[in-house]
Image (tube, grey):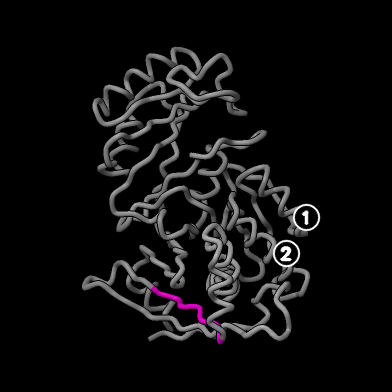
């Protein structure tokens, strides 16, 4: 068992002074080849009624998980003073950004620079008081965190970009920041970490001859998926309606909507990469990578770090 100390300061500032301080235990599991490590973090309060109230709203599980693991992720394990940090997009990432700002104001972190993955995360960081820099091809990023739409169990390959982007959001920018990071952590809820995957994969395509590209994608997954062009307003459909979504880079978004289980995200990405009209897609494969999984029974972290790195995290 690996025990990692946590500080009461990691609790939400909204908690009352009389509330019970959670007790945390970290249980470490290893498979036979030491390549994938799982830490299960159980969060238990002294009052069962408090716990049941906290879990009564299923949609708050990920928020609660992110709030209680921020110290582990940012302070105890990943982020230290002087780092350049990729700031993710999504609800859990927003909480991590807010916490980082509080740590900077408190002096627990110093000289940290954030590189946002989206307009939303840039705005959240500005409010939190995190100094920002823009991503460039030469950017050196020590660590990044992000929400994911789904994670493939075992491989930790992720899908991002399923949600309708707002304003000038960009899958390309988000992926660029994540891929540039030396280390990456995704935050998901339990139902987003699956061995059998379903749902959609977004694909960015050139607007010229987009329909030919859509037909080529359809041929790749014939019988297993439908290809729809994403609309900016109104109902979605195969053609994207009269107002198709155009990204800030000028690309159209095709959603590959799988009607059968997705066999392998890595194979999907490889197949898409061979098509001329495809600019990018929402599949992210990163090493090293870790995933924080939130459930009503607690938290788990799974990573694909090397055996030596995994041993180091347990010390």
Left of 1 or right of it: where is 75? right
Judge whether residue 286 is colored magenta: no
Q: Is residue 6 visible?
A: yes
Q: Is residue 245 visible?
A: no
Q: Determine the residue positioned at 60% across, 68% down.
A: 67
Q: Do callouts 2 and 1 mark residues in contact (Cβ within 8 Å)?
A: yes
Q: Determine the residue positioned at 21% across, 73% down.
A: 32
Judge whether residue 41 is colored magenta: yes
Q: Position of residue 231 (x, y in %)?
A: 54, 24
Q: Position of residue 206 (x, y in %)?
A: 48, 20
Mark 2: few, some, or many residues within 10 Å (few <14, many ≥20)?
many
Main secondary-structure element of the magenta-colored stretch: strand
Q: Over which residues does the magenta segment extend?
A: 39-46
Dot 2 corresponds to which residue?
101
Is 60 or 312 nearer to us in this picture? 60
**Residue placed farthest to the left in the image?**
32
Q: How many marks?
A: 2
Question: Which element carries disc 2, helix, strand or loop?
Answer: helix
The image's mark for residue 127 is 1
Quarter that holds the N terminus: bottom left
């Amino acid at each position: 068992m690996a025990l990692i100390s946590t500080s009461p300061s990691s609790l939400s500032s909204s908690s009352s002074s009389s509330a019970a301080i959670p007790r945390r235990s970290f249980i470490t599991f290893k498979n036979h080849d030491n390549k994938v490590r799982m830490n299960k973090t159980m969060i238990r309060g002294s009052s069962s009624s408090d716990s049941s109230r906290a879990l009564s709203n299923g949609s708050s599980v990920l928020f609660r998980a992110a709030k209680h693991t921020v110290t582990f992720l940012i302070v105890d394990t990943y982020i230290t003073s002087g780092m350049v940090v990729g700031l993710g997009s999504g609800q859990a990432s927003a909480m991590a950004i807010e916490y980082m700002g509080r740590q900077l104001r408190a002096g627990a972190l110093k000289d940290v620079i954030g590189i946002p993955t989206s307009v939303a995360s840039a705005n959240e960081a500005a409010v939190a008081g995190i100094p920002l820099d823009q991503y460039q091809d030469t950017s050196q990023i020590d660590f990044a965190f992000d929400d994911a739409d789904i994670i493939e169990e075992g491989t930790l390959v992720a899908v991002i970009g399923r949600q309708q982007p707002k304003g000038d959001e960009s899958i390309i920018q988000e992926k660029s920041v994540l891929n540039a990071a030396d280390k990456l952590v995704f935050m998901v809820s339990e139902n987003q970490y699956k061995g059998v995957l379903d749902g959609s994969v977004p694909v960015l395509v050139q607007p010229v001859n987009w329909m030919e590209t859509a037909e080529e994608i359809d041929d790749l997954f014939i019988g297993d998926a439908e290809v729809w062009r994403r609309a900016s307003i109104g109902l979605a459909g195969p053609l994207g309606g009269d107002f198709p979504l155009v990204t800030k880079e000028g690309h159209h978004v095709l959603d590959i909507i799988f009607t059968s289980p997705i066999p392998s995200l890595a194979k999907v990405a490889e197949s898409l990469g061979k098509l001329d009209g495809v600019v990018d897609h929402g599949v992210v494969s990163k090493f090293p990578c870790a995933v924080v999984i939130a459930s009503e029974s607690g938290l788990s972290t799974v990573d694909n770090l090397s055996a030596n790195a995994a041993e180091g995290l347990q010390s």
